[in-house]
Image (spheres, rainbow, N blue to C red):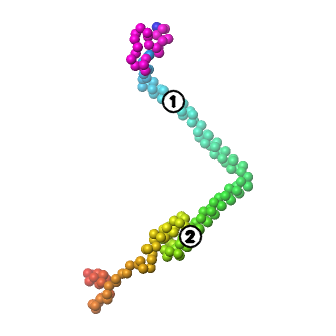
Amino acid sequence: MSENTANAGTTPQGEGANENPAMEGSQPKTFTQEEVNALMGKTRKEERAKFANYDDYKAAAEKLKQIEEKDKTDLQKATERAEAAEARLAEREAADAIAKAAREVAKATGVPVEALRGTTREEIEAHAEVLKPFFAKDAAPSVNTGSPSTEEQGSGDPLRDAINQML
């Protein structure tokens, strides 16, 4: 029997070769549901143990951040405030430049500045060219208000007269 255990992974010489080389040797071990549950429970406990101190690490990181903030020099704090102010100023200047470009394009094309959209002068000009036919002076439709009514009670507006007759 010791020969069988010593040669567990090999095929005995006199018994013939196994047709499936992957199945050579002993049969794979099967587990009961209780054994699988025990293995899974053990694995879960090990994984939870890895992250057991997560809240402690998180609190320590927050404390370190507070300490680093306290340790900053006044110069660093002033530099950060100045950088933030410069960023806001740059955003404001960009918005003002776009508004100025929109006013100039509106004046040149006759399209109201409120109707123009775009983030660059080129986009605003392209949008103005699309809208320009709709804001041309001769583009306004002429509305026929009707001829004055010849009736004594007529208001000169045929629609109004028809509504008044229904009432």
Secondary structure of the magenta portion, mostly? loop
Depth check, front residue: 15 or 93: 15
Residue named by callout 1: 43
Residue 159 placed where, x, y %? 30, 81
> Does 167 sit left or right of 15 as displayed?
left
Q: Residue at x 50, y 11 (%)?
A: 6
Does 83 lie within the magenta span? Answer: no
Depth check, front residue: 157 or 23: 23
> Does 91 sit left or right of 114 as displayed?
right
Depth check, front residue: 105 or 37: 105
Q: How many marks?
A: 2
Give the image quarter of residue 17: top left
Residue 127 placed where, x, y %? 48, 68
Give the image quarter of residue 98: bottom right
Residue named by callout 2: 101
**Residue 64 appears in the rendering:** yes
Amino acid carrying mark 2 in the image: Ala
Q: Residue at x 54, y 64 (%)?
A: 119
Amino acid carrying mark 1 in the image: Thr
Residue numbers of the magenta segment? 2-24
Q: Earlier in the sequence, mark 1 or mark 2?
A: 1
